[in-house]
Image: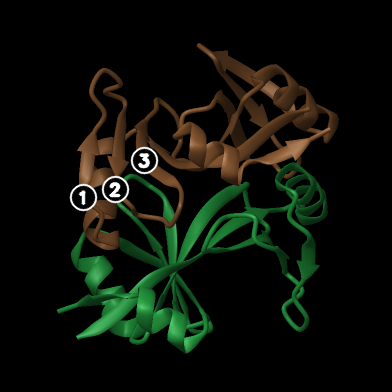
Chain colours: A brown, B green
Amino acid sequence: MHKSRVYAVLLDTPEPEAAAAFWSAALGAPAHPVPSEEQFTVLHEALPGLVTAVQAVDDTPRLHLDIESDDVEAETQRLLSLGAEQVAQWLECRVLRAPGGHLVCVIPVHSDPDLFESQARTWP
Amino acid sequence: MHKSRVYAVLLDTPEPEAAAAFWSAALGAPAHPVPSEEQFTVLHEALPGLVTAVQAVDDTPRLHLDIESDDVEAETQRLLSLGAEQVAQWLECRVLRAPGGHLVCVIPVHSDPDLFESQARTWP
């Protein structure tokens, strides 16, 4: 058995500064660059219960979800068995394309362990 | 003064049945077609505090946010003044493209009035 939960909504864009300024003002969410991960700008409490962040990408603008799991390999296999396809692997992040065409990343647990334990779903 | 809050995350796709089946299983969220609005399939409690739904579109797959407001015109003008551009109007929904390239829709209040009052932000 393993667990997973939706951890974050990522706003991917090749124009991260413009996006962060807009969404920070639009949602009333202070924008904080992430030290040591300069491609990310977190929008503090922009969405309830989820991390919201702008990510700089050399690609077309898109939103994607990050799913955190205590077993990235098992969670990736679960999503592949549901019809997703792996399109990339970046450090410990598996990038999958879901049926219907949306991207989703599977990442190791990033949230507080107590939060993860209380909110994650358990999969057989 | 007017108020607004993020109401929903929409998964737009030309393959709504495949997307709804995947995301329902992936997130453990029962999928419910919306009576009288057959382009929408709600994923019950897929994300905390937000409506999550698959929307059938004749376009490339994307995610977008819906912002609900008690004054759609004022909220639209606020977002335009922050740099968004209006790209479409569909019934009472204003479709805007934000700086950075993401879509956002401004819609009338859809959530419970008490929920809206307690969670919406007030803008001058």
Give the side of residue B22 with respect to residue B50, left or right: right
Question: Would you say residue B108 is visible in this rendering?
Answer: no
Displayed quadrant of residue B116: bottom left
Q: Is B84 above or below relative to A124?
A: below
**In terms of depth relative to the viewer, which is nearer, A112 or A21?**
A112
Give the side of residue A123 with respect to residue A68, left or right: right
Q: Which mark is residue A30?
A: 1
Q: Position of residue A47 (x, y in %)?
A: 41, 55
Tags 3 and 2 both on a single chain: yes
Label 3, label 1: how many angstroms apart (C-alpha)? 11 Å
Decide: few, some or many residues near mark 1? Use Cα within 10 Å; few <14, some 14-19, many ≥20.
some
Of all chains, the one bearing label 2 is A
> Are the residues flagged by discs 1 and 2 in contact, CB closer than 8 Å?
yes
Q: Which mark is residue A53?
A: 3
Q: Provide the secondary structure element on which disc 3 rests.
A: strand
Question: Would you say residue A26 is visible in this rendering?
Answer: yes
Identify residue type, mark 2.
Answer: His
Identify residue type, mark 1.
Answer: Pro
Q: Nearer the viewer, mark 3 or mark 2?
A: 2
Which residue is rendered at x = 62% and y = 24% of the image? A70
Give the side of residue A101 with respect to residue A112, left or right: right
Give the side of residue B20 with respect to residue A29, left or right: right
Q: Provide the secondary structure element on which disc 2 rests.
A: loop
Q: Is A17 above or below relative to B10?
A: above
> Are the residues flagged by discs 3 and 1 in contact, CB closer than 8 Å?
no
Quadrant assignment for the C terminus of chain B: bottom left
Tags 3 and 1 both on a single chain: yes
Q: Which residue is mark 2?
A: A44
Q: Position of residue A33 (x, y in %)?
A: 22, 33
Of all chains, the one bearing label 1 is A
Identify residue type, mark 3.
Answer: Ala
